[in-house]
Image (cartoon, rainbow, N blue to C red):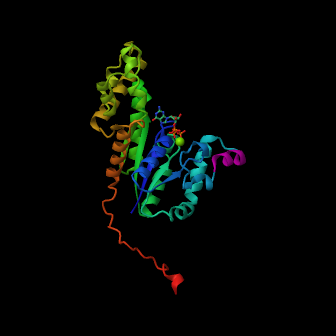
Amino acid sequence: MRYAVLVTGPAGAGKSTFCGAFMTHLQTAKRTGHLVNLDPAADASSFEYEPAIDIKDLISLEDVMSELGYGPNGGLVYCFEYLQQNLDWLEEELGGYEDDYLIIDCPGQIELYTHHPFLPMLVRHLNRLGIRTCAAYLIESQFMEDKYKFFSGVLSAMSAMVNLEIPWINIMSKMDLVTSSENDAASGRNGIRARKDIARFLDPDPMLLVSAPGSREEKTERNSRFHALNQAIVQLIEDHPLVSFLPLDLTNPDSIETVLSHIDYTMQYGEDEEPREPHDLDEGDFADME
Ligand SMILES: Nc1nc2c(ncn2[C@@H]2O[C@H](COP(=O)(O)OP(=O)(O)OP(=O)(O)O)[C@@H](O)[C@H]2O)c(=O)[nH]1
Ligand SMILES: [Mg+2]
């Protein structure tokens, strides 16, 4: 059985950094993982590990922009349409990896997750190839500093989940930035506050939106419409608590371990692994002896 984890989330959420930490962890645990780069704009120097499969070998955003005159976002769409028309390239690239874990680093354009058909298409293709796939959706801990930004992150995670329909976990990345700001709170700076507050974000408490401190109570028409929208969002999240976040602090090995065991569990990793025969002979193993 082959496994793949799609590492998704908005720009700068820490996807590529997480992929690197994931690879290191697999290596430490003596498991084989391979990095797959799906970001046609990725800069090669940004990878801690050389990707085993790289969309840039098929098409790069730079070429699309310079040769076809596309901008960065239209160019990305073009790259994925091109990938869609050349799935045999991907299939061939994937052919060499058996019994392995593929870590797929995705681009950060949010529209890719919310309404483009490319990722669902890709997942269907991976399934056809017998690769069990799950997704990790990262948002960064700084989102917790602004509750409106945070809930837009929650809604984008929900929308991506609904779009993809595969086993899924949500991750609050860069938690190292939070722990260090507890001192700031004590010193009166308006950082992310105490642990009990953090719990209300990891398991999103929609009442955070209602009790927004500093929300101006002007009774303008615009504000009351905004309030009604907030109310509706609160209701939506209360009725469909689909999203909760696992905290990820890359400076803490236990935290990485916990997140990765959730991913294993989500994918039912290893559940139908047969014990390997000591000598798994391939036809042709003795070819040179004949
Ligand atoms: N403090 C801290 N910084 C991090 C962490 N993970 C990533 N970063 C920083 O956040 C920035 C973005 O990280 P990337 O891993 O490139 O994020 P990405 O999601 O791959 O970004 P795009 O591919 O551009 O969407 C970099 O400057 C990283 O050094 C983390 O766990 N803690
Ligand atoms: Mg990246």
What percent of the width, then of the height, locates residue 110?
A: 50, 39
Q: Quadrant of residue 70?
A: top right
Magenta stretch containing residue 141, yes or no? no
Rendered location of residue 267, percent (x, y): 35, 53
135 up-or-down from 143: above or below: below
Q: Is residue 281 visible?
A: yes
| Nearer to the camera, 51 or 136 | 51
Residue closer to the observer: 70 or 59: 59
| Place of residue 274 in the rendered image (x, y in percent of width and height, measured from the top left) | 32, 67
Residue at position x 33%, y 59% in the image: 270
> Can you name the residue that lies furthest to the right here?
67
Q: Is residue 96 above or below residue 189?
A: below
Q: Looking at the image, which residue is at 32% across and 40% down? A: 242
Q: Quadrant of the N terminus?
A: bottom left
Toward the viewer: 74 or 107? 107
Residue 11 position in % (x across, y down): 52, 37
Residue 58 appears in the rendering:
no
Horizontal placement of 205 versus 25: left or right? left
Residue at (45, 76) in percent of width and height: 282
Q: Residue at x 41, y 56 (%)?
A: 31
Name the quadrant containing residue 189: top left
Q: Is residue 67 magenta?
A: yes
Q: Is residue 141 left or right of residue 11?
A: left
Q: What secondary structure do most residues of the magenta stretch adopt?
A: helix
Looking at the rendering, the stretch of residues picked out in magenta corresponds to: 60-68
